[in-house]
Amino acid sequence: MKIHSTSRPAVLLPLVALLSTSPIFAANSPDVPFKGIATLHKLASHTRQYKAKTAYPTFRSQTPLARFVNAKIGLQQRRGYFDWLHSTKKDLAQQAQEKTLGMLPYEYEGSTALKYFAPNKLISIQTISYQYLGGAHGGSYFQNHNFTMVNGKPKELALSDLFTSGTDYRKFVETQVFAKLKKNPDAAWAQDKSVKTLTPSQFNNFSLTPSGATWTFNEYEMGPFAAGIIEAKLSIAELGPNFKKSLVAR
């Protein structure tokens, strides 16, 4: 799957037991995922030299898991926004002094997309950062976050949490993901074997839903900029017998 936006530049910041009354939400599109279940908070600042904005949700559910996600994602999005403003103002001042200002205005946009919402069991959310600092185009960075309850406490999942201990889950996932990428014409660097392994951050950049796990590869990770964002999805069956199906049981 290729996701590529030309309407705005991209980001360089690398920034489920259910109760019968709790909503379950699975999103295929990031356009309207939070309606009715979250309040969207927005921050914005602009001058003639830069434009910056970010938006992030606060889920209305008061489960421990939802509150944990609210705190983690809210902090991440606010930090990305204010860090960008601070560094950009500093850079612009220096460039003005040196008379090396690039194409203005510079831009930053932070946003989020909901992939799955079961507030007592599993919440999967994607953060998206875009920035333009002059030149031909900006850049975007997509980062997935998956949260569940472990031993009664909320936790953000890593790849190791998805499989039973003592198994070579990294090698298994890498083999399965590259098999998918080699069938995707946009993943040129996987096909010509310029890229043969996954980095630690790539292993953990997956979204999790009851239908499986989807790995997201950012610009220039598996192909040139024109390839956009590339995805590789593994179904529950393709995740193999050592995958902890209880994580996504409805």
Image (cartoon, helix red, strand yellow):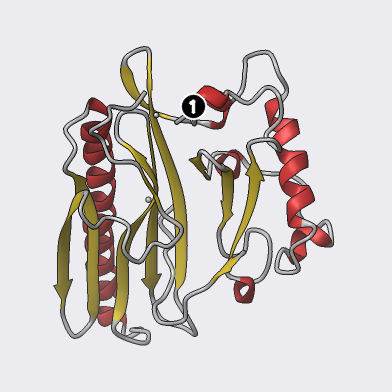
Whether residue 17 is situated above or below residue 181 in the rendered picture: above
Determine the secondary structure under disc 1.
helix
Q: From the image, which quarter does the C terminus lie in? A: top left
Nearest the eye: 78 or 123: 123
Image coordinates for residue 235, horizontal then vertical, percent: 65, 42
Image coordinates for residue 233, horizontal then vertical, percent: 63, 49
Q: From the image, which quarter does the N terminus lie in? A: bottom right
Left or right, 41 with reference to 143: left
User: Which residue lies most toward the front here?
Assistant: 20
Left or right, 206 with reference to 174: left
- The image quadrant that residue 169 belongs to is top right
Image coordinates for residue 6, horizontal then vertical, percent: 46, 81
Type of amino acid under label 1: Leu
- Circle 1 sits on which residue? 247
Q: Residue at x 23, y 44 (%)?
A: 75
Crowding around mark 1 (Cα neighbors within 10 Å: few <14, some 14 to 19, many 20+) is: many
